[in-house]
């Protein structure tokens, strides 16, 4: 069973981004970039399926510029066997990514595609769902457990206030939630090995897809600054403030 994992290069989750002065977006010049955390979980999940002899090959795919090769190398160091960069200079939005991934899926014929539930830069949470719709495949989003038996996947989903277990026929799309696994630490020997694994580059134009954006960002704003806290001398003052100032009790 071939498994594809979709990985995105995003601003590292530790970086505190700044809104540009013209509010057109956030400044990402010279900031640390890393693999989207939910995609690391996706690669780890696929690697574990391979280690359990359920998957036969794990392919990591990214859409973006040459620099995204770095993200693919990380996926290869975690455990992917092969990587594909769909190269484009276009500003990619989820629909364009889903269309590009669909073209790769049609070429590679995987039985399972694992994506993150959300990219931490655009917070769109759309690509997996769009891809499932374009392929007309079943999907299970926000997975906290994936089991494969024969032609079926059993996926536990994190839903409000509990868990839901669904069964879906392969080929299928799964998106990962935080508690699916804890991705392994990438070791130096594995980084060295990853350098020798195959990484192919496909031009987005060669796939006959127009990746141009459908949405225009009008404005990006900083969240409102939080007011400084105060220290209270005792519990009685705290209760009084919660009651009369904050009016929360
Ligand atoms: P989003 O819909 O943008 O929140 O992204 C959800 C998931 O889609 C991510 O966690 C990735 O698995 C995948 N994805 C989004 N953008 C890309 C991209 N440029 N290349 C590869 N995968 C992507």
Image (cartoon, helix red, strand yellow):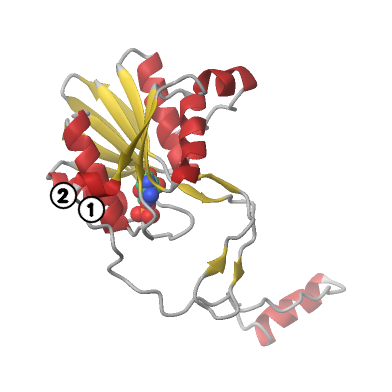
- Split into 4 quadrants, where in the image is the C terminus? bottom right
> For residue 103, what is the image quadrant?
top left
Determine if residue 117 is in view.
Answer: no
Determine the secondary structure under disc 1. Answer: helix
Return the x and y of residue 140 as percentages of the image width and height.
Answer: 26, 42
Tell me the crowding category of disc 1: few under 14, some 14 to 19, or many 20 or more residues within 10 angstroms, Cα based.
Answer: some
Residue ID at (52%, 23%)? 195
Residue 130, numbered label: 1
Tell me the crowding category of disc 2: few under 14, some 14 to 19, or many 20 or more residues within 10 angstroms, Cα based.
Answer: some
Tag 2 and tag 1, C-beta contact below 8 Å: yes
Q: Give the spatial CA distance, label 2 vs label 1.
A: 6 Å
Question: Is 124 left, or right, of 225 in this rendering?
Answer: left
> For residue 83, what is the image quadrant?
top left
Residue ID at (26%, 43%)? 101
Residue ID at (38%, 25%)? 82
228 and 204: which one is in front? 204
Toward the bottom, the furthest residue is: 244
Determine the secondary structure under disc 2. Answer: helix
Q: In the rendered view, would you say 53 is above or below 127?
A: above
Which residue matches tag 2?
134
- Split into 4 quadrants, where in the image is the N terminus? top left
> For residue 110, what is the image quadrant?
top left
Question: Is 130 left, or right, of 215 in this rendering?
Answer: left
């Amino acid at each position: 069973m071939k498994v594809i994992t979709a990985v995105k290069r995003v601003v590292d989750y530790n970086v505190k981004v700044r809104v540009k002065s013209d509010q057109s977006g956030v400044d990402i010049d010279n900031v640390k970039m890393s693999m989207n955390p939910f995609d690391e979980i996706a690669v780890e999940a696929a690697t574990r399926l391979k280690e359990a002899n359920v998957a036969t090959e794990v392919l990591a795919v990214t859409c973006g510029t040459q620099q995204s090769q770095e993200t693919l190398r990380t996926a290869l160091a975690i455990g992917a066997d092969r990587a594909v960069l769909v190269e484009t200079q276009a500003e990619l939005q989820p629909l364009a990514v889903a269309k590009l991934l669909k073209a790769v899926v049609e070429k590679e014929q995987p039985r399972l595609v694992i994506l993150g539930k959300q990219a931490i830069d655009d917070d769109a949470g759309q690509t997996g769902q769009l891809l499932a719709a374009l392929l007309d495949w079943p999907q299970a989003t926000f997975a906290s457990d994936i089991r494969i038996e024969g032609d079926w996947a059993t996926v536990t989903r994190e839903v409000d206030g509990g868990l839901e277990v669904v069964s879906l026929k392969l080929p299928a799309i799964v998106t990962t939630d935080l508690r699916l696994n804890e991705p392994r630490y990438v070791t130096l020997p594995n980084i060295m090995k990853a350098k020798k694994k195959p990484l192919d580059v496909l031009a987005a134009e060669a796939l006959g897809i127009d990746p141009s954006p459908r949405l225009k960002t009008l404005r990006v704003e900083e969240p409102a600054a939080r007011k400084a806290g105060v220290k209270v001398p005792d519990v009685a003052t705290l209760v009084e403030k919660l009651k009369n100032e904050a009016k929360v009790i």
